[in-house]
Each structure stands twice: as C-alpha cells, then as structure tokens.
Amino acid sequence: MRGFYRRALSKIERLTPQQCRELLVSASGEILRLETVLDSLPSGILVCDEQHSLIMANKSSLRLLPLSNPEGSPLWELISDEYVAAFFQRVLSNGDRVLEHEMDVEAQGTSRLLSISVHPLVDRRRITGSLVHVEDITEKRAGEVRLRRAENLASLTTLAAGIAHEIKNPLGSISIHLQLMQKALAKSAAKNSVKQSPLIDKYFNILNEEVDRLNRTVVDFLFAARPMTLELREGNINFLIAELAEFIKAELEQSHILLLLELDENLPPALIDERYMKQALLNLIKNAQAAMPSGGLLTIATQVSDNEIRISVCDTGVGIIAESLAKIFEPYFTTKDNGTGLGLTLVFKIIKEHHGEIAVESREGEGSNFEISLPVRRKEKRLITYEEQK
C-alpha cells in the first residue's frame, strides 16, 4: 500500500483534481483504519521522532502512562512520574534498545506493573525515531505468583508427609517417658521422705512445653499436607462471623483491640465447610491481633458484589513491608520469631478449596486488609413442564 501512494505522489503533477481528491480520501481511510487498529490494542504504542518528541500515542499508552500532554514535546517532559521520566530521558538520549524493562507506575490512581520496550524506528535503512511498547503485566505476574504458591503447596505436601511420621512418633514417646520420669522421681522422693527440688519440676515443665510446641508444629504440617475433605453445606457467612466474634471478643479486649463488624444484611448463602472457614478466619484474626501489640481497630466486613461474597479482615497494625507481600502465603515464610510460616498458607489452601480467592493490601505502619472472595451459589434452573394440547 505504501508503494502505491509513493508512486501516486511521484506523479502528483499529472493527476487531475478529481484524482487528487480520490487519493486523499483513500489515504484518509487508510490512516483512520491504522489509528483504529492501534487504539484497539491492549498494549501502549508511542512513536517519537529523531528529537525524541512524541508524535503519536494510542489510547492504551495514555491509560497506562501518566502523560500530561498527548503529543509535541520530548517524551520525558510529558510524564509526571520522575522515575519513569528519567528512564525515558536516559534511554532515548543514548539511543539504547530496551527489552521488557519492568517498572511500577501509578496512573489514574492505581499502581500497575508495566513492561516497557524501546526500539529504533527504521525507515528505508535510516533511524527516524523511536518506538515504545508498553504492556501491563500486573495480572500476568499475579498469576505467576499464584502458580508458584500452588507449586509450593505441592512440595509442602511431599515434605510434610515425609517428616510427620519420622517426628510425630518419637515425640509421643519422649512425652510419655518424660511424664513417667516425673512420676518416678516424685514417687521416690515421697518414699524416702525427701523434698523434691523445685528446679526439677521447672525443667520437666520446660521439656513438656517444648515437646508440645514441636507436636503442634507437626500437626500443622499434617493439616497442610493432607487433602481436605470438605463437607460443603449452604451456610450464612454473617452468622459464622458473629459466632467467631463472640468467641474471640474477650481475648481481643484483653489486647486492647476494638472489634467492629460491618455485615451486609443482604448477603446470600454460600456453600462452605463451617469448620474450615472458621479456621481460616480465626487465623486471619490471630494475625491481625499479633500485628497490633499496642491495641487498635479490627474490622470484619462482608458484602456481595459481582456475584461474589467478599469478606475483609482489616487491622490498623504495623502493616507488611512491600518486599514481603508477594511471599506471605508461601509455606515457611514468617515474620514472627516463633511462627511456623504455615498459618497464612493454610488460609490460602482453605479458600482455594472453597473455589475462592484471597488477596492482601498493606502499607507499613498503616495496617493490612485481607479480602476473601467466594462464589455465590447459583440457583438451579428448573424447566417448566410442557404438556402438549390434545
């Protein structure tokens, strides 16, 4: 098509006004078609001339990048984000070729992860500018994180099954023999009318506590490793949360934590296993409690939106640093001194078994918000019986 227009332009002096008009209409149609194609692309496309001035930007690029002006100035002068502007100024000024450079960019009030590529714009073997390709990879990376979590859960299953049998039985034997030793010493002291040293009881208590702690860890591993057999029944999430709140309220008050429930009265029933769902919510509440050592506000809210039941557990605690956010559902990852790193992994597994999703938003020093999304149970459609008239 370009060859046709070039040949036509080379003969422009010999064309009649009518032919020039038809050529202009045809060229306008081609340009409009190209603009439509570019604006329909989900990726951003920007074109700069040899002076690095922006001469073209499709709609997606204006949505993805914080551009203050559409065209006419050097690209970096049009971008309000200083870090992104400095990146484009360095790359374009040096004439560098960049492939899939990832950057966090905030545009239109949302933070997105972008993959940016910069290529030279070549026309007839001469560089005439630069072509910038911008792709939103936020969901792609989130999907990779979810896949990695699923793989980690699979590896956890293999590991836990192997170590549980190797550790649990010896622990039980140690616990029993500690108790037998304690009783034997007490009996011997009573028989000989000798007062047993309080240090002995103290040491035995420490040993028993440590054995119990190790046993609880092994039980957590087993819980995470074994396939869950859910007994899904139609249940009311609000009632479940209210029961859980009544159970944990006194403990939260002792920690100077105010519990606030914001439950949607129009919440539809959901297919849940109450035992496992209570365990997941309790783990989130315990995490929130640990994140507010000096007290604070814990809000549990429910709502229905887009055919989903959403449950949020929001605290005003210490928050989670950005580097840890992508890892908190992974096995063994913990920021606690005495944590096993399995609490949130179990929550993740329980929600997944309910065909739901869980996400977290957090800022260091401001608190965290865990949001669970569960599918709304669809009502069965019944066909109306049709009786043919005789």
Image: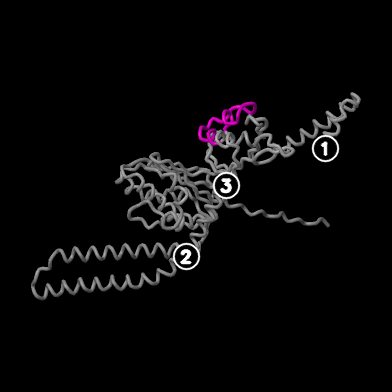
**At which x and y percent is residue 134?**
61, 40
Give the x, y percent position of residue 129. Answer: 66, 34
The residue that label 1 is drawn on is 3
Residue positioned 30% across, 64% down in the render: 212
Q: Looking at this view, is 206 or 233 the one in front? A: 206
Q: Residue furthest front?
A: 125
Magenta stretch encompasses residue 138: no
Spatial separation of the CA atoms under disc 3 and disc 1? 41 Å
Q: Which residue is mark 2?
A: 157
Image: magenta residue range: 66-87
Instruction: Name the colour scheme.
Output: one colour
Q: Could you tell me which residue is drawn at 40 percent across and 69 percent down?
A: 164
Front of the two marks 2 and 1: 1
Element marked by disc 1: helix
Which dot, 3 or 1, sits closer to the camera?
Answer: 1
When the figure is inspected, residue 369 is found, relative to residue 336, above or below; the finding is: above
What residue is drawn where x is 52% and y is 40%? 104
Q: Nearer the viewer, residue 167 or 353?
A: 167
Whichever of callouts 2 and 3 sits on the residue coming sooner in the sequence is 3
Residue 139 numbered mark, or none: 3
Which residue is more in the foreground, 329 or 215?
Answer: 329
Between residue 19 and residue 127, name the one nearer to us.
Answer: 127
- Identify the element where label 3 is drawn: helix
For numbered disc 2, what is the local secondary structure?
helix
Residue for point 33% across, 53% down: 337
- Distance of label 2 from label 3 (alpha carbons): 27 Å
Amino acid, disc 1: Gly
Give the percent coordinates (x, y) of residue 193.
Answer: 8, 73
- How much space separates mark 2 and mark 1, taking CA atoms? 63 Å
